[in-house]
Amino acid sequence: DQQVKQNSPSLSVQEGRISILNCDYTNSMFDYFLWYKKYPAEGPTFLISISSIKDKNEDGRFTVFLNKSAKHLSLHIVPSQPGDSAVYFCAASYGGATNKLIFGTGTLLAVQP
Amino acid sequence: DSGVTQTPKHLITATGQRVTLRCSPRSGDLSVYWYQQSLDQGLQFLIQYYNGEERAKGNILERFSAQQFPDLHSELNLSSLELGDSALYFCASSPRVSSYNEQFFGPGTRLTVL
């Protein structure tokens, strides 16, 4: 049972435009959400996170939006740059005594020059 | 560079064999996590240790085991290997065990079982 879903395996965007990556989750107990970026042959790199008490978090070119009623989050990258081309994973965690992350299957973003 | 190191980078072995993957967390991080990424899959949580003690288990096979040592490095032991165990294995660390903190990932160990 896939609790965190990224339904778009890939996305292609022109340099300078906005990239929007989407993620849906099914478990309403999740209270912390993260986005990771992964280049080939490297481990995932943390990008940005949001707790369930917020609906938006911004860090430079990256903004994450959380819609709890829809169980949906999105990552906006503005403006997109060729160096942003990578696989993006969203992840979720529960509160409590553990911090294990439940990952989506990833979206491959290609930013065209 | 996340500060998390993993060795070896690549490992090729045969079915039925046993291997050990090693992870050193970031300096000061007490919590270590292991994840498996199979082909075209997201990362699947295997197990978490905090300050030497097992804290949480995911869908980890009985053939797999892990431990965290007093110096906080961790090892993941995979035994009676099968073809389906071929995957990327990532280690991550974080300062605390609780929620609301990100995990920092190592570069991974690519295991190939022939």
Image (cartoon, coloured by chain):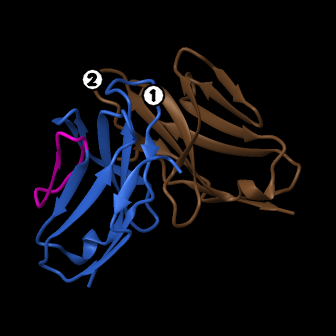
Chain colours: A brown, B blue
Task: Indicate the secondary structure of the residue bearing disc 2.
Answer: loop
Is residue B82 left or right of A59 when viewed as pictured? left
* Rendered view: B105 above or below A66: below
Protein chain holding label 2? A
Magenta span = B58-72
Q: Nearer the viewer, mark 2 or mark 1?
A: 1
The residue tagged 2 is: A97
* Rendered view: B1 above or below B14: above
Residue under the image location 21 percent in, 54 percent down: B75
* Rendered view: B49 above or below A28: below
Q: Is residue B65 magenta?
A: yes
Quick one: quadrant of the C terminus of chain A? bottom right
Question: Picture quarter containing residue B94?
Answer: top left
Main structural element of the magenta stretch: helix, strand or loop? Answer: loop
Task: Indicate the secondary structure of the residue bearing disc 1.
Answer: loop
Residue under the image location 35 percent in, 44 percent down: B25
- Mark 2 nearby-residue class (10 Å; few <14, some 14–19, many ≥20): few
Labels 2 & 1 near each other (Cβ < 8 A): no
The residue tagged 1 is: B101
Amino acid type shown at disc 2:
Ala
Question: Picture quarter containing residue A58?
Answer: top right
Amino acid type shown at disc 1:
Asn
Location of residue B55 in the rendering, given as x and y in whole percent from the top left corner: 20, 33
Asked if residue A26 shows in the view, the reply is no
Location of residue A12 in the rendering, given as x and y in whole percent from the top left corner: 76, 60
Protein chain holding label 1? B
Q: In this orientation, which residue lies closer to the viewer: B2 or A22?
A: B2
Cα distance between the residues tagged 2 and 1: 12 Å
Q: Is residue A15 magenta?
A: no
Residue under the image location 51 percent in, 31 percent down: A33
